[in-house]
Image (cartoon, rainbow, N blue to C red):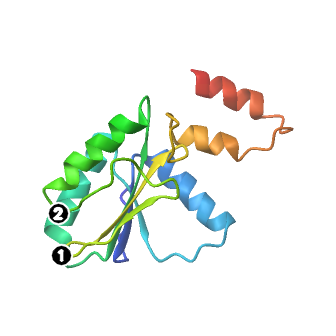
Amino acid sequence: MKTEEKFDQKLLVEGNDDQHVIWSICVKNEVIKSFDVIDCGSDSQLLRQLTRRIRFNADQVKTIGIILDADTSLLKRWIEIKKEVKDLGYDLPDTPDAQGTIIESSSYYPRLGIWLMPDNLQSSGMLEDFAKVLIPEQDQLLAEVERVLSE
């Protein structure tokens, strides 16, 4: 089901599970809804949507954020993103900022925010690895979560 977009701030995520985790985190932390969380369907679709939204909707979008899984290599994922936005005039640093990378646009294009799961540092992994860290160690379901992640 496609979510209606209402805001001039967009957060692009890889899939439906990611979208629901972000919504849950926002509800739990009482984040005021001022942005759309958009399920892009996959990591490659997210990158395509990112450039398309920047190029063709820049006048309607103030900020675009992306959350992508680092998967097997954070640096490899970072290089993919750098290549994707370079022709649009975004100059990303050589490595992501540990607190999250935010690039102010000096041109027509919107502000860009980037976070690589699970921790935006040197760890490889995905959203599920991040979510696992949120579970208390004594939680009885932690063993089941670890089993599912290993599969």
Mark 2 vs mark 1: which is more N-terminal? 2
Question: Would you place residue 102 above or below residue 116 in this image?
Answer: below
Q: Residue furthest right?
A: 138
Q: Is residue 112 visible?
A: yes
The structure residue drawn at horizontal position 28% and vertical position 75%, both measured from the top left corner, is 61
Q: Is residue 42 visible?
A: no
Q: Nearer the viewer, residue 109 or 3?
A: 109
Q: Residue furthest front?
A: 94
Percent x, y for residue 82? 26, 49
Q: Residue furthest top?
A: 151
The structure residue drawn at horizontal position 34% and vertical position 35%, both measured from the top left corner, is 76
Please tell me whether mark 1 sits on a helix, a strand or a loop. Answer: loop
Residue 131 is labelled as: none
Q: What is the three-letter code of the residue carrying label 1?
A: Ser
Residue 61 is left or right of residue 6, and the answer is left
Question: Would you place residue 82 above or below residue 31 in this image?
Answer: above
Please tell me whether mark 2 sits on a helix, a strand or a loop. Answer: loop
Percent x, y for residue 52? 18, 58
- The residue to which callout 1 is attached is 107
Question: Would you place residue 66 above or below residue 149 in this image?
Answer: below
Residue 89 is labelled as: 2
Is the Cβ of the residue at disc 2 closer than 8 Å to that at disc 1?
yes
- Image quadrant containing the C terminus: top right
Q: Nearer the viewer, residue 59 or 38?
A: 59
Quadrant of res 140: top right
Quadrant of res 79: top left
Percent x, y for residue 119? 55, 46
Residue 136 is left or right of residue 40, and the answer is right
Percent x, y for residue 30? 65, 72
Residue 121 is left or right of residue 1, and the answer is right
Mark 2–mark 1 distance (CA, rounded to whole Å): 8 Å
Q: What is the three-letter code of the residue carrying label 2?
A: Gly
